Amino acid sequence: VPIAVSLRAAFPNGRIAWLVQDSFSDAVDAHPDVDEIVAFHRSNWTRWWDPTVAMDAIRWSRTLRNRFDLVVDAQGLGRSGWLALSTRARRRIGFSDARELGWLGCNERHRVVAQHAVDRMLGLLSAAGIPRKTDLRLYTSEAARTWWSHERARRGIGRYAVLAPTSRWVSKDWPAERWRTLAPELLTRGFDHVLFLGTAAESGQVDAAMPQDQPRAMTLAGMTTVGQSMAVIAGSDLVIANDSAPLHMAVGFDRPLLALFGPTNPASVGPYGRDSCVLRSDEARRFSGHYRDRSIGDRLMRGISVANVLAALDAGMHRIGCSGEPR
């Protein structure tokens, strides 16, 4: 998002397109600095070694040819490098150390030294002579806002907290029983409702994290699009999440938040500018392995207790760095 803002400031009359996986396009298509979404249908091409699938992907990549003057590969992977090359743009800016030989797709390669992912991406622009704008604001579509307004009224939802108890890896998941214990405690601290978010594939995991016989704790897992989930987060009074997309959405909507971290380093991938909102155990801070190591289980996340979360909430840690009203 800050790259789109920076490009708009640098090229106010330019047309800015964002190439994004189709299932995530809702996350950015309402942004005022983005003119066009180019949807990448990743699920269609997972079997890339199949000649028919490969040819279909190549044919699609040719639709990018000669449409752009400037391409920024902020992902730095083999796939994004291939797509950058496919555009044949005169300037193709990327990382000199892009993984999977992704640097081959760019003709302007820069070495960027920065710890946080946001600073690393913005550093790519700075190295290319494009001034950076650190603006992470997110936007929801009118359709998503209208849906949530009607749904909220229908369900009689008042002041609410959002809990996002899932992630893509067990090592980053806070235990289900602790979410079950936390939710009722939030209802005694001024929240009328607690809403659980997750994808359809995560519905079982979300159900396991929900308290029983508590009508003011509701699940929206599998019931929302990405854009609708963003609308829910935008109107919330608190977001508590693992290292996952809802956490960064909370940053983009300037919401009060608490971030629960285990094996991943919040200095690199944490809520940008909201370091004081992060909870992490001492064991996790000493950890030097990789979050994909399945032997970790949820051990590092178990170092964060429900009492730790409630103490942080009572101390107002969730509001540090948050300045706005619900958007």
Image (spheres, helix red, strand yellow):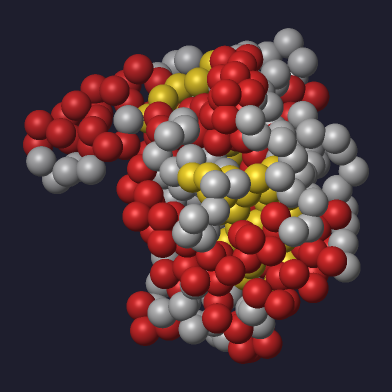
Q: Decide if residue 52 is on the left or right side of residue 9.
A: left
Along the line of sight, the residue nearer the viewer: 165 or 244: 165
Q: Residue 143 in the image: x percent, y percent? A: 57, 15
Residue sitting at the far left: 51
Q: Is residue 147 visible?
A: yes
> Considering the image in quadrants, where does the N terminus appear?
top right
Quarter where residue 303 is shown: bottom right
Q: Is residue 232 above or below residue 261?
A: above
Q: Decide if residue 274 is on the left or right side of residue 87.
A: right
Tell me how many marks there are. Answer: 0
- Residue at point 29% right, 23% down? 60
Quarter where residue 280 is shown: bottom right
Q: Residue 135 in the image: x percent, y percent? A: 79, 37
Q: Residue 136 in the image: x percent, y percent? A: 74, 39
Along the line of sight, the residue nearer the viewer: 289 or 253: 253
Along the line of sight, the residue nearer the viewer: 83 or 96: 83
Q: Is residue 149 above or below residue 208?
A: above
- Residue at point 50% right, 21% down? 37
Along the line of sight, the residue nearer the viewer: 268 or 80: 268
> Considering the image in quadrants, where does the C terminus appear?
top right
- Residue at point 68% right, 87% down? 282
Q: Is residue 252 visible?
A: no
Q: Residue 301 in the image: x percent, y percent? A: 55, 77
